[in-house]
Image: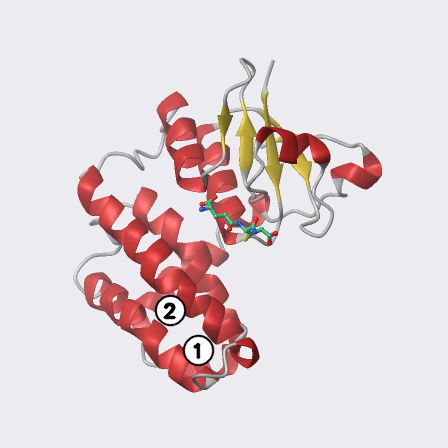
Amino acid sequence: MPATLYSFRRCPYAMRARLAISVSQTPVKLREIVLKHKPPEMLAISPKGTVPVLQLADGQVIDESFDIMLWALKQNDPKAWLAPNFEQMLQWVTANDEQFKPLLDKYKYAVRFPEHSEQEYRQQGEVFLQRIEQQLSQSLYLMGEQQSLADIAVLPFIRQFASVDLQWFEQASYPHLQAWLKQFIDSALFRSIMQKHPSWLESACEIDFP
Ligand SMILES: N[C@@H](CCC(=O)N[C@@H](CS)C(=O)NCC(=O)O)C(=O)O
């Protein structure tokens, strides 16, 4: 019996889980949720109420996106996303999740955080962009010449940062980062995981994924 994945299309954490599940070709039943109306079935297995949540056939629940990525890639890792040094990949993911993501939220919802202006939050977030730009000026991807778990775990958040003010992003001088993001957004893999699905609560419709 395939695992069940509770997902929300536009959530960057759910995106990275779907990306790893998709590349690993591990079949799951996807339940598209609406954050304002979380299904009781999901809250029963993961009361913290965040997506993504994966429930395995044996009942085990994995409710952290990075752990879901690792689970999927341990089933099958055809693109060798787990091949680079794990500690170094973890450093990128931790910097993204713990430092960059809170700034991204403040930049995106600056009106809710009036201590600083939108522009100031953006500048704070740009410290991470600069780190990435610096790395990508030396290698095609964060961990060298091949795409890895580190790129995939971080890219959905950079995409979100870029889309807060696309006009600003397009004129900013991050040529390597911009090319890295564009290649990701244009990829068949990314497009496939961004397909729209009806919500499971309304339609009772589970999607065979990937
Ligand atoms: N650390 C979690 C974070 C997941 C998370 O915060 N997801 C957001 C959506 S992008 C969420 O579900 N928020 C709950 C809500 O908005 O009610 C993970 O990596 O899976």
- Do residues under tags 2 and 1 come within 8 Å of each other at their CB atoms? yes
User: Disc 2 marks which residue?
Assistant: 178
Residue 182 shows in this picture: no
Query: Who is closer to the viewer here, 124 or 184?
Result: 124
SS of the residue under disc 1: helix
Which of the marked residues, 2 or 1, is nearer the chain's N terminus?
1
**Left or right: 50, with 143 as reference point:** right
| Residue 32: x %, y % from top left | 68, 41
Badge 2: residue crowd in 10 Å (few <14, some 14–19, many ≥20): some
Query: Who is closer to the viewer here, 199 or 210?
Result: 199
User: Disc 1 marks which residue?
Assistant: 169
Give the residue at x 62% y 46%: 8
Badge 1: residue crowd in 10 Å (few <14, some 14–19, many ≥20): some
Residue 184 shows in this picture: yes
Give the residue at x 71% y 34%: 40
Query: Who is closer to the viewer here, 108 or 185?
Result: 108
Give the residue at x 52% y 39%: 18
Give the residue at x 27% y 53%: 92
| Residue 210: x %, y % from top left | 58, 32
Q: Amino acid at mark 1?
A: Phe
| Residue 125: x %, y % from top left | 35, 72
**Left or right: 136, with 25 as reference point:** left
Query: Who is closer to the viewer here, 205 or 61?
Result: 61
| Residue 175: x %, y % from top left | 31, 73
**Left or right: 49, with 33 as reference point:** left
Number of the front mark, 2 or 1: 1
Q: Amino acid at mark 2?
A: Gln
